[in-house]
Image (spheres, grey):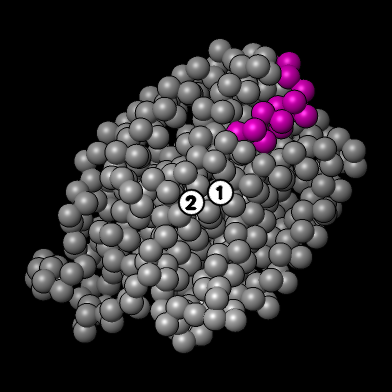
């Protein structure tokens, strides 16, 4: 059955709305460190490298939570993880208003924030989309990617203006209040799966039962890592994280300020990037339902690399705006085709845990680039080398994407005995 409220609206769309609100909030939390680099430098005298280290810890734990959250969602559903993740966001933001030591920044914006936002991030979107939808799956993933973009669009602008008017401490308290409000729809409207409401996934039957004995044959990931496609997906997504969240998400505003552009103006460019990201990600979801995801990924990574090559030579708002448009169109447009390839190759039943580890690779890339970007700025006085290296790495991501074999089916019943024999 595919009935919903009043027999008309499929309830999965309500779940999509609640999930989107949660993703917006999580993205808002993760966007704050890039806004705080200069205020923290000025107030405490902490170096860009030291602040970037705390940010990189958060990005790393954000990624490590992916497979853990994915496994828990596969077992018990996403609702409890959403509640816990949002509560941790409230704790990290509200208590950080009182911090005065660097270790507190590492603890709150690194450890607590990283764990909390990691519970309610891209893996959440992939799990919800693949639980509730067969048709429109790519579109739903595009909507979730757009929600992440909207979080960046809304919160970067909001936090910069709040920092200017009421200071960074007041800004993080406002963010804590927003996260608390986001708990309300999760508590009252979120459902774990269509079966909880006697529904089927939109456009298809429920996921077939697991093959008997599959878990005893080494576990999901023991089989997944033997497949080249896992490493190609993880490697390309590592590059995605390094060139998006790691470099641009963390250092774009600081790079702009270094070139004499005000923080408010830089935030406007970043907000423009978020708006274009919304368009690009939703569009990517639409395209993923219709075209080869590998070719889409190759295009996205190529354009991203070319954009990064140009950024070191941009020193005015007009140039930043042009960069924001082109880079924003594929900032996280990589998510729908990557998630779709993961589900197609490894199965919808396993997408939570497998995509969780692929997303973990994404955040390893983000953490590495966030730290080394700050280190390069502290050492050389500018980000130019970091952006040029990032551009070259992005081109490699396109090559990796095209090497993925869409016909690989490592988790089909006929392949499981082979995996067991290999063990």
Tell me which corner region of the image, top left, top right, bottom left or bottom right, holds residue 191.
Answer: bottom right
What residue is disc 1 on?
146
Q: Quadrant of the C terminus?
A: bottom left
Residue 142 - label:
2
Instruction: Name the chief secondary structure element in magenta.
Output: helix
240 horizontally vs 231: left or right: right
Circles 1 and 2, Cβ within 8 Å, touching? The answer is yes
Residue appearing at x 56%, y 23% in the figure? 323
Residue 193 vs residue 228, the one in the foreground = 193
For marks 1 and 2, give the CA distance: 6 Å
Task: Name above or below for residue 245 compared with residue 255.
Answer: below
Under circle 1, the secondary element is helix
Instruction: Say few, some or many: other residues with alpha carbon within 10 Å of mark 2 (under 14 / 14 to 19 / 20 or more).
Output: many
183 horizontally vs 416: left or right: right
**Total marks drawn?**
2
Q: Is residue 17 magenta?
A: no
Q: Residue 13: x, y in percent?
A: 55, 67
Residue 329 - label:
none
Q: Quadrant of the N terminus?
A: bottom left
Residue 21 vs residue 261, the one in the foreground = 21
Instruction: Say few, some or many: other residues with alpha carbon within 10 Å of mark 1 (under 14 / 14 to 19 / 20 or more).
Output: many
314 horizontally vs 341: left or right: right
Q: Residue 387: x, y in percent?
A: 50, 24
Q: Is residue 260 magenta?
A: yes
Residue 358 visible within the image: no
Q: Residue 228: x, y in percent?
A: 21, 50
Under circle 2, the secondary element is helix
The magenta segment: 259-273
Tell me which corner region of the image, top left, top right, bottom left or bottom right, holds residue 163.
Answer: top right
Residue 290 visible within the image: yes
């Amino acid at each position: 059955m595919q009935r919903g409220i009043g027999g008309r609206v499929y309830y999965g769309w309500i779940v999509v709305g609640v999930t989107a609100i949660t993703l917006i909030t999580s993205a808002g939390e993760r966007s704050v460190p890039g806004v705080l680099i200069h205020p923290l430098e000025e107030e405490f005298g902490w170096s860009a490298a030291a602040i970037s280290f705390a940010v990189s810890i958060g990005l790393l734990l954000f990624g490590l939570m992916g497979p853990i959250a994915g496994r828990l969602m596969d077992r018990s559903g996403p609702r409890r993880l959403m509640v816990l993740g949002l509560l941790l966001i409230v704790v990290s933001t509200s208590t950080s208003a009182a911090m005065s030591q660097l270790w507190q920044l590492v603890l709150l914006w690194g450890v607590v924030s990283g764990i909390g936002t990691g519970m309610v991030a891209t893996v959440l979107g992939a799990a919800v989309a693949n639980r509730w939808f067969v048709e429109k799956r790519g579109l739903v993933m595009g909507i979730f990617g757009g929600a992440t973009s909207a979080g960046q669009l809304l919160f970067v602008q909001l936090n910069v203006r709040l920092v200017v008017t009421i200071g960074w401490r007041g800004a993080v308290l406002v963010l804590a209040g927003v996260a608390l409000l986001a708990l309300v729809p999760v508590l009252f409207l979120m459902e774990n799966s269509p079966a909880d409401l006697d529904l089927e996934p939109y456009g298809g039957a429920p996921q077939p039962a697991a093959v008997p004995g599959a878990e005893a044959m080494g576990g999901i990931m023991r089989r997944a890592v033997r497949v080249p496609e896992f490493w190609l997906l993880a490697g390309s997504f590592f590059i995605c994280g390094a060139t998006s969240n790691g470099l641009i998400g963390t250092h774009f505003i600081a790079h702009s300020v270094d070139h004499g552009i005000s923080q408010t103006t830089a935030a406007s460019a970043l907000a423009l990037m978020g708006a274009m990201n919304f368009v690009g990600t939703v569009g990517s979801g639409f395209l993923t339902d219709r075209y080869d995801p590998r070719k889409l990924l190759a295009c996205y990574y190529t354009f991203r690399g070319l954009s990064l090559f140009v950024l070191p030579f941009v020193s005015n708002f007009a140039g930043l705006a042009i960069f924001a448009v082109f880079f924003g169109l594929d900032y996280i447009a990589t998510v729908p085709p990557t998630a779709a390839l993961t589900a197609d190759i490894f199965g919808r039943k396993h997408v939570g845990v497998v995509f969780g580890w692929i997303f973990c690779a994404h955040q390893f890339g983000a953490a590495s680039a966030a730290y080394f970007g700050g280190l390069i700025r502290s050492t050389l006085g500018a980000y130019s080398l970091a952006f040029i290296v990032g551009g070259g790495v992005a081109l490699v991501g396109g090559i990796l994407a095209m090497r993925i074999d869409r016909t690989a089916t490592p988790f089909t019943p006929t392949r499981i005995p082979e995996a067991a024999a290999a063990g």
